[in-house]
Amino acid sequence: MVAPAGRLARVRRGERLTAAAWNDLIAAVLGPRGAAAEQGARRAPQLALAEIDSIDGDYLVCRLVGAAIGGVVALRPPLLRNPIGGWTRGGITYTYGGAQARTADNGAATEPQEITPSYLAGDLLVIGGPVFGGLLPAASEPPTTPTVWMDLNVDGRQWAATA
């Protein structure tokens, strides 16, 4: 996967991405200033690779891979969050019982559900940011941090019935 200077190497279908290839991609997207530059300033969206340190409700506290920056807050995608008091969508009422568990009730039957694959400390995420405006949860603001990111859910996490 070696490419001429200043160019990214092409990845072929089925080929595994190495850490070096991820770092090249992140450097190409973030540019020479990197993710740490001007954390609080509004700027064009960027991508980063982050490792989960802890799961705090709808927020994932991460550290950026390849940088000594910890305490980065990444929101879970909107449909994977737990709104306070639950919500109804498409005639199904969802009641949340933990950061990664809920119950779906259509009026005739209930179904326990969990996020799968679950979020675990040490998981790698591709995050995008900064996030502004209507993407923040209505119930509360995130922990104090100059920039909030969002998990782009490239692992395809979703709610699924538990047996």
Image (cartoon, rainbow, N blue to C red):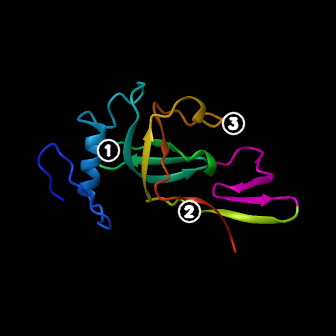
Amino acid on which the number 2 mark rests in the picture: Ser
Q: Are marks 3 and 1 in contact (CB under 8 Å)?
A: no
Label 2 Cα neighbours within 10 Å, binned few <14 / some 14-19 / many ≥20: some
- On residue 118, which mark appears? 2
Q: Is residue 93 left or right of residue 52?
A: right
Residue 45 picture location, percent across and down: 41, 34
The residue drawn where x is 43% and y is 59% is 122
- What is the magenta range? 81-107
Amino acid on which the number 3 mark rests in the picture: Ala
- On residue 155, which mark appears? none
The residue drawn where x is 29% and y is 66% is 15
Label 3 Cα neighbours within 10 Å, binned few <14 / some 14-19 / many ≥20: few
Residue 37 picture location, percent across and down: 32, 31
Q: Quadrant of the C terminus?
A: bottom right
Secondary structure at numbered mark 2: loop
Residue matched to label 1: 68
- Cα–Cα gap, marks 2 and 1: 26 Å
Q: Where 43 sits versus 104, above or below?
A: above
Q: Are marks 2 and 1 in contact (CB under 8 Å)?
A: no
The residue drawn where x is 32% and y is 44% is 68
Residue 31 picture location, percent across and down: 26, 36
Secondary structure at numbered mark 1: loop
Q: Nearer the viewer, residue 30 or 6?
A: 6
Q: Is residue 135 left or right of residue 125?
A: right
Residue matched to label 3: 139
Q: Residue farthest to the left? A: 4
Q: Which numbered disc flags the more N-terminal residue, 3 or 1?
A: 1
- Cα–Cα gap, marks 3 and 1: 31 Å
Residue 116 picture location, percent across and down: 58, 64
Q: Nearer the viewer, residue 136 or 105?
A: 105
Q: Is residue 34 left or right of residue 134?
A: left
